[in-house]
Image (cartoon, rainbow, N blue to C red):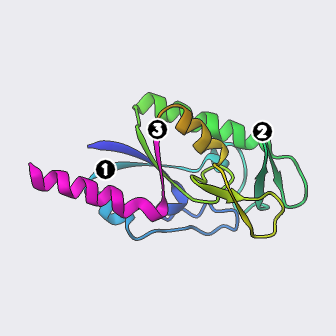
Amino acid sequence: MEKILISACLVGDKVKYDGKSNYNPLVRELLQYYELVPVCPEVLGGLTTPRTPSERKGDIVIDKNGKDVTKYFIKGRDDVINIVEYLHIKKAILKENSPSCGVNSIYDGNFNHKYIKGSGILTEKLKALGVKCYNEDEIKVLIDEKANIDKEH
């Protein structure tokens, strides 16, 4: 079964900055077609849960109090990249808008709930390595893709 990287918050792990999850019920269907490899780069990088919210601003990540937390995001990114390379993962489902995992958009770095086009620190690196990145709104696409392949065989 193909392994797929997934943001741990989407599988229900309470690793979101506010101590909650972003559980997506489609994850249960994914389990029919993929072996899930849940990760939270922010927690792997050494940040606690709950934690002060952070946003990406260019190449740095700052928390809402103005503290530069980039080193935690880079450590988490690098730890996840090691997992991806070791397990030969080619696809990832990541939490949109996150400073680590945003696929197509991230918060603008001003803590005003506005988004800009861009990717999180982890996603940027995954894309550069050729990993196909999807956000949580694209889970159904992955399920349908696999279901159609199964029907053909």
Say which residue label 1 marks.
Answer: 34
Q: Nearer the viewer, mark 3 or mark 2?
A: 3
Residue drawn at point x = 49 percent, y = 68 percent: 23
Relative placement, left or right, of 32 versus 7 is left
Which is more toward the observer, 149 or 24? Answer: 149
Residue flagged by tag 3: what amino acid is it?
Val
Name the quadrant containing residue 73. top right
- For marks 3 and 2 on the same chain, the one whose residue lies earlier in the sequence: 2
Which stretch is magenta? Answer: 132-153
* CA distance separating discs 3 and 2: 23 Å
Say which residue label 3 marks.
Answer: 131
Name the quadrant containing residue 104. bottom right
Which is more toward the observer, 67 or 134? Answer: 134
* CA distance separating discs 2 and 1: 31 Å
Say which residue label 2 marks.
Answer: 71
Q: Main secondary structure of the magenta part?
A: helix
Residue drawn at point x = 53 percent, y = 38 percent: 127
Residue flagged by tag 2: what amino acid is it?
Lys
